[in-house]
Amino acid sequence: MESKENSGYRYESGRRYHNHDAGAYYMPNDDKEVSRLDTQHNIWLVSLDGELHRAPIAENPTSVLDVGTGSGIWAVDFANRHPNCNVHGIDLSPVNPNCATPPNCSFRVKDVETEWDFHDVGPFDLIHSRMLVQGMRDWRGYFAKCFKNLKPGGWVEAHEVRYPKHSANPSVSADAPYLRWGHVINEGLAKGGINGGAASKFSDYLTDLGFGCVTEEKIEWALGPWKEDEKGRRIGEMQLANIHSGLEGLTTRVVTKNLGWTQEQVDEFVKEIHEDIDNPEKKYISTVSVHTAQKPV
């Protein structure tokens, strides 16, 4: 697998990756991935009925942190909805949103798994994170940092996906390409010290650390427009586009670095999955979850 560094980025197999703590996160950060993250943001908006969060935060928050901000779209959206709140986004990569950044929104390069120093902008009313499973190795440590950096009465909220995947059609073989992909990614993440199903432990972590009002909401995203309800079909259409766009990036670095696959093996597997997920009879599903918790007053 060809790799080279240039202008603070790392290039592998034709994709651009972050070069800050290189290897800490398996996803690319090029324009294709930024566009996919914006699509993913819209899936979450539909899932949450147009809202950006579930936590019942203060009516007039003054400082909010978006962890692993990606394209920056969540931070920008929150800042536009709360013009009197300072919103800070952090990511392993420099952030260049596809939309105009309001003056109350700022970004910085930061590895969330290193020590935090937000004395200049914290403490926070809300610390938000989304879809960090391919990069977070110590979730309990992350939530401990959130507790320390929240205001009394402040909230932490984590939106996360879980591996492996499943199907609502009992006749679908466990060896179907998309289901097999979920297990392969889970195995690759585990070899890199990451638990692809870590969200199942979030409630315990949050409770043990002293948070109150801990809630967990599980949401099913269909893959393709096979759901009967309008909301489910809309999510399914966007999720199908999301996976088609992101499949190569979701797969390549995890399996080449951690499982020893060749690029040719990756390309052939990805091709099989693209064909497989276009079959609506497979009724594939991804489970995502929303966890919220409050620091005691």
Image: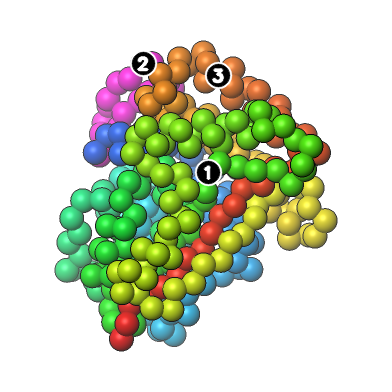
Determine if the magenta segment contains residue 107: no
Q: Where does label 3 land, which residue?
A: 267
Secondary element at image label 1: loop
Give neighbour class at mark 1: few <14, some 14-19, many 20+ (Cα, 10 Å).
Answer: many
Highlighted magenta segment, given as a residue range:
1-20
Mark nearer the N terminus (1 vs 2): 2
Label of residue 142 in the image: none
Q: Where does label 1 land, which residue?
A: 163
Determine if the magenta segment contains residue 13: yes
Q: Where does label 2 land, which residue?
A: 2
Mark nearer the N terminus (2 vs 3): 2
Left or right: 185, with 274 as reference point: left
Q: Amino acid at mark 1?
A: Tyr
Secondary element at image label 3: helix
Which quadrant of the figure has residue 24? top left
At x 39%, y 54%, the residue is 69
Q: Amino acid at mark 3?
A: Asp
At x 75%, y 35%, the residue is 172
* Count of residue discs: 3
In the rendered image, is residue 42 in sight?
no
Q: Amino acid at mark 2?
A: Glu
